[in-house]
Structures are given as structure tokens and as C-alpha cells.
Image: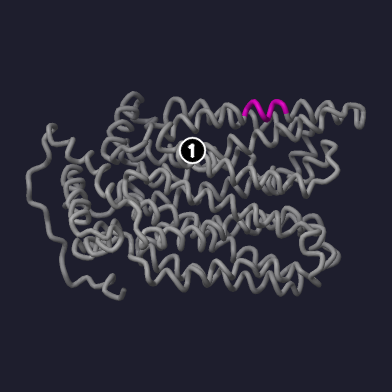
Amino acid sequence: MGSDDDDSRPLIADEREPLLDSQENEITSLSSVGQPRVWTATLVVAISVAIIGCSLQFGFQTGCMANTQDTLRSAFKNVSDVEMSLMISGLPIGGLFGGLSAGLIADKIGRKKCMLLNNIPILIGTVLMSVGLNQHLFLVGRILTGFGCGIATGVAPMYISEISPVSVKGAVGVSHQFMITFGILLGFAMSVKQALSWFPKYWHVYFAFPALPAFYQLILLPLCPESPNWLYYNKEREDLARAALTKLRKSRSVADEEVDAMIRERTSASSSDSVMVSYKDFFTNRTLRLTLFIGLALQAAQQLSGVNAILNYGPEILTDAGMKNGDTATGLLGSINVLMTLISIPLMDKMGRRSLMLWGQLFMILSYIGLAIAQRIHDTNPGGEEWTKYVSTATVISFIIFFAIGPGSIPWLIVAEIFTAEARGKASSLCVGANWICNLLVVISYDKLNKALKPNTFFLYMGIVTFFLIFTFFFVPETKKKQVEQINREIQEQAEKFPPVVF
């Protein structure tokens, strides 16, 4: 694959006239390109390498602390609440820096090399965590794996979106979130003490598990093609983009059609003579400014909903509500999260992104209301109201269900759909960075918020979700099976409704 970096051949310019309005249907017909051979072995392997090596990795690291805090306290001795909070927060701390740099690295060296090199901090962090000499080295390992997960959450959705046919882009995009939820479930299931009680000091092996998806990616990723979009737009190598698509689609004619569509797309956008979008452009261009704001808001909506508070502190929440076995209940939450994300895959290209986001947020609000009321009644009359634990369990499950079918998957997918290829790398860095900042805020603040506001903590989260529901309704466009030019035109029309100082 060394030829991916060969800049010796210039891009073959398209000198045709810009498209007339009557020719726009030709661009939108790209959605049907490749339908006879949508799934090929190369495409399936490439997707699996990205989501197992990146998404599964992130999911496991997210879920691995939920049931292991008591084990780590016993292993390290004298672990303070602050140190434990830092160990939990180490993932988003590292993830913030990884997320902010993901798009820049992926634009500079390519999606493939970015994913390959990302395994270095993942493996070093895994060694430090699994050896477990003390809590300080464990924290360093957690931060390093967080850095790798931050890069992974930026580059994996970008790569799988850019290699997938338009007709299945929504379903493929959800595979990123599906594998995250599967990783979280693995983290839950493997850390239940009864599951590995026969293995002496099993937790060392448990924290070494992330090495397996890392090695899977290291072995198979070199056999996969580079992103055709990156080769065409970033490296200006039409020939290599055509070769990558031929390998992915197993059809030269289909590859030719998709590359020709890229050329038409670039020409119609009047960007054939432009350089890549700069950070300044995100603030000076009205359409880009609103597009970035939508991307940032959707990432914030995912994390500030409080989902990681429920995932990391699930056993504690359900135990406080009166459940006797918090570990089992948390495993149930992880299973439901995986199942509902799987169910959302066909819905994504049928109902659309915006509709699922709105319905998901609405029922998350209702779930929070039920959970907050049940907790309030339980706290004022402990043990007196048996029904509160069932309501708490049902509402937490309901929250996970509707988070999984909408706000869990859609932010990752939309970021890859609303930005042009020239802007996607930098936009991804900013949006994924925002996701990790909000992730960190929730993880480090939940315990203190819960102690200060209990039993009103979930009323606060309900208010946050309500705010983002209103934002989604008024600002987020539907992107289902639309070309990026059409999406950008809709966002431009939306931006023009406001004074220039706003958008």
C-alpha cells in the first residue's frame, strides 16, 4: 500500500461547465451507485477492522470501570475518592486530547495510518493498566488508552462513512455505535465478580483484554484500502481513489461512476480550485459556522444527557433505588443498549436521523421524570415504597432504549454527513473534542451533583435533554440519503433566517 503516499501524479481536473439545475438529479443518483454489489468481502473486512479496533476498544474502556471500583480499591490499598474519580475520568481526559487531534492526524497521514499508529498508546496504556503496580501507573495507562480512544472515535466513523456506498451509509454508520455498546456490555459482563471468580487475580487479565482488538486491527488493516475520499480530496490522487473504490466495490465501472461523482461534486461546489477548509473558515463562513454549531450541539447532546453517569454509576443508582444486585442490573442495561442499537440500524435509513433523534430525546425526558420521582419518593420513605425500585429500573431501561435508537448513534453519523470532504477532518476534530469535553464534565461532576442535588439530579439532566430536543427540532436537518450539497443548501437557508452576528 506504499503507493498511497505517492504524490507524483496530479489530479486529473474536470474541465466541464458547472452543473445546471437540470443536472442536479445526476448527482443525487449516486445513491443508487453500487447497489448491485453493495456488500463485498473487502468492504466488510474494512468495516470490521475499523469498528473492532476502534469502536469496540472505546466501548470496553467506557464500561470497564462500572463494576471494578471495589476490586481496584482492594488491589491498590488506600485509594482515595479523588484518586478513584481520576481513574474513572482518565479515559475522557485522554480522550479529549485524542479527539481534538484525530481529524488533523487523519487529514495529514490518512485514515489508515492514523488508525494503525493509534494502537501504540492503546497498547502501552493496556500494559500499564493490566500490570497494575499502583494507582498512579494505572491512571497514566487509563489516560493513554483514553488518548487512543479519542482518536478512534474521530477517525473510525470518518473512515467507514467514506468507504461505504451511499445507499447503506446510515446502517453502516450505526455499526460504530453498535460496537461501542457491545464493548460496554463486554466491560460489564467480564467484570462481574462471579463470572471470573475462578481465575486468580482475574482483573489483570481483564484489563489486558483491549490488546486483542488492537492486534486484530494491526494485522488486517494493512490489507484494507485507504479512504477514497482522502485520496481524492486530500492527496489529489484520482487514480488511487479509483483503485481503492475498485477494490471496495469489486467493479471498475461502479468505481468509475463514484469517482466521476466526486469530480462533479467538487465542480458543482466551485471548490476545484480551493484549498482545504481552514479553522478560520468555520467562523467566517455563515453556512460552515451553523454546520459546525449543529455538529457540536449534537455531540454535546449525546454526552450531557447523562448517559455515562448511568453507565458508570449504574450499580449505585439501582442499589440506591432498592435493587439488591446492581451488577446484574448493569449487565441488563448493557444488553439492552446493544439490542436497541442493533434495532436502530434498519430504522436509520427508513425513519431518518432527525426523527429518531427527536423521538429518542422525548422519551429520554419522560424516563428521567419517572426516575427522579421514584428516587425522591424512595429517599423520603426508604423501604416503605417497594414499587419505587421497579419504577427506577424500568425508567433506567427506558432511558437506555431511547438513547440507543437516537442520540447514541446519530451524532457520530451526522458529523460525517453534513460536512464536505474538505472540511470533514477539522470539523471531526472539533466535534469529537466537544464530545470528550462533555463526557469528562459528566463523569467528574455526577458524584458531586448527586450528593448536592439528590434526589433532583435527574431533573437537571431532564432539563438539559429538553434544551437539546428544542435545538434538534429547529436546527438539525434530515440527512437521510441526501448529498452533502443538498444538506449544505438547507443549512445555508436556515442560517440566512438569522442576523449575520448569530450565524
Give left or right: position of 477 versus 150: left
Q: In the rendered image of this protein, does residue 488 appear above or below residue 497?
A: below
Secondary structure of the residue carrying tag 1 is helix
Q: In the rendered image of this protein, does residue 88 appear above or below residue 378?
A: below
Q: In this orientation, which residue lies closer to the viewer: 69 or 182? A: 182
Rate crowding at label 1 as few (under 14), some (14 to 19) or many (20 or more) other CA atoms within 10 Å.
Answer: many
Residue 226 is one of the magenta-drawn residues: no
Highlighted range, magenta: 365-370
- Residue at image point 20% right, 43% down: 269
Q: Residue furthest front?
A: 36
The percent coordinates of residue 13 (x first, y second) are 12, 56
Residue 369 is one of the magenta-drawn residues: yes
Q: Is the magenta stretch mostly helix, strand or loop?
A: helix
Q: In this orientation, which residue lies closer to the viewer: 210 or 250? A: 250
Kindly identify which residue carries mark 1: 297
The percent coordinates of residue 70 (x first, y second) are 82, 58
The percent coordinates of residue 464 (x first, y second) are 60, 32
Q: Quick one: quadrant of the N terminus?
A: bottom left
Q: Please identify the quarter of the rendering in which residue 333 is found.
A: top right
Q: Please identify the quarter of the rendering in which residue 404 is found.
A: top right
- Residue at image point 40% right, 54% down: 160
Q: Quick one: quadrant of the C terminus?
A: top left
- Residue at image point 74% right, 54% down: 85
Give left or right: position of 497 versus 454: left
Q: What residue type is labelled 1?
A: Ala
Q: In the rendered image of this protein, does residue 242 appear above or below residue 412?
A: below
The percent coordinates of residue 302 (x first, y second) are 55, 40
